[in-house]
Image: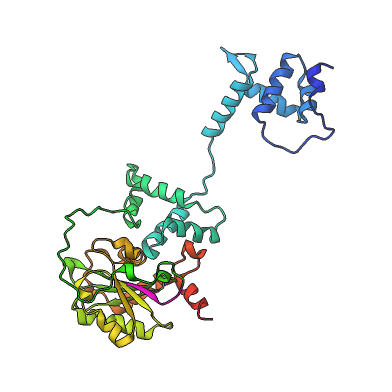
Amino acid sequence: MLPIISQLSCMNKIRSFTQLEETDRVKIEVLLQQGLSYSKIALILNRSVSTISREVRRNQSVRGKRPVYYSARIATKKALLRHRIKPKHSHFDISMKCQIAEWLLEEKLSPELISIKGKRQRIDFVSHEWIYQWIWSMKFSLVQANKKWQGLYRYLKHGKRRRKRGNQRCRRGNILNRSWIDQRPSIVDKRGRYGDLEADLVLGKNRKPGLLVVLDRKSRKTWIRKLKNKQTRHVINQIKDICRKSDRPIKTITLDNDQAFAEHYKIKQDLAIDTYFTHPYTSQEKGSVENRIGIIRMFFNKKTDFTSITKAEIKSVQNKINNRPMRMFNYKTPNEVFLQSLH
């Protein structure tokens, strides 16, 4: 027996089928150079004779029409190429695409949430990254069959993001008795308790009054109210109504410098709730409610005429947002987190 053979393990029983790897092909090349037959090579590699014969026949180098020699490097390259171009069953079929489009358009779910929800129904459901790539590839596709998917990118949360530029002067009127966010208790920053709220407004077509959005910083539970106007008395009364009906005592509210919040001091007078204001042009200081507004905009875009939107429609959107799974809560919903905290 040649030295190379003694270094290779030989098992009595042929192993179950697995594809040949590059290391197997290197051994085949060496053993063929030593003049061994297919049957002896198969015995050494613990493979069937037909596997060795088929491997050499399919992947050996050819000059003209005549086989010349077997090279592990060339054989691996041929095998990979053949695997790449062969027809494959695609589990990313039309039914999955339609389901993704439905959840994106109707439920306004993000690709991540679509993937999580889909895997509960189909084990082979694609990842969120695959969904993102597919949606953006459809935007630029010239294939007629893909035309119905071309507009899906518009329903991504940041699909139409535009940067706003402008001067940094604050032209808002003066709001009396403001306490800046720097004076807010540290426990609010840490989201260590329920009852610390953020509030903001959503405007509609032609900057007409739209919605009041109030959010609990810890659970992300959200309340949405339709506004008849932007007068400070009406807005503050809506906030007070939300606070009175809350299942938990409200401790603080963080606002921005919109004139609609000018009578904020009445909240403290009537309900003993402290109010704090972000610095001008720093929306990130109340990022949680800004995030929720981004999702609300997926249901009501900036051209929405809220005079034609009913309270029932707004309530429906509020329920969808509060029942929307969130990664930070291990895909529990704000409602689930808020209700658990009450037990």
- The residue lying toward the viewer, choosing from 198 and 109, is 198
Rendered location of residue 59, percent (x, y)? 62, 23
Q: Which residues are magenta?
A: 193-199
- The residue lying toward the viewer, choosing from 41 and 274, is 274
Q: Is residue 198 magenta?
A: yes
Q: Quadrant of residue 110?
A: bottom left
Rendered location of residue 197, percent (x, y)? 36, 74
Rendered location of residue 198, percent (x, y)? 34, 71
Residue 313 in view (yes/no): no
- The residue lying toward the viewer, choosing from 286 and 75, is 286
Q: Quadrant of the C terminus?
A: bottom right
Q: Is residue 45 above or below residue 170?
A: above
- Relative to 8, 207 lies left or right: left
Rendered location of residue 249, percent (x, y)? 41, 83
Residue at 46% over, 60% down: 113
Q: Is residue 22 magenta?
A: no
Q: Quadrant of the N terminus?
A: top right
Residue at 18% over, 57% down: 168
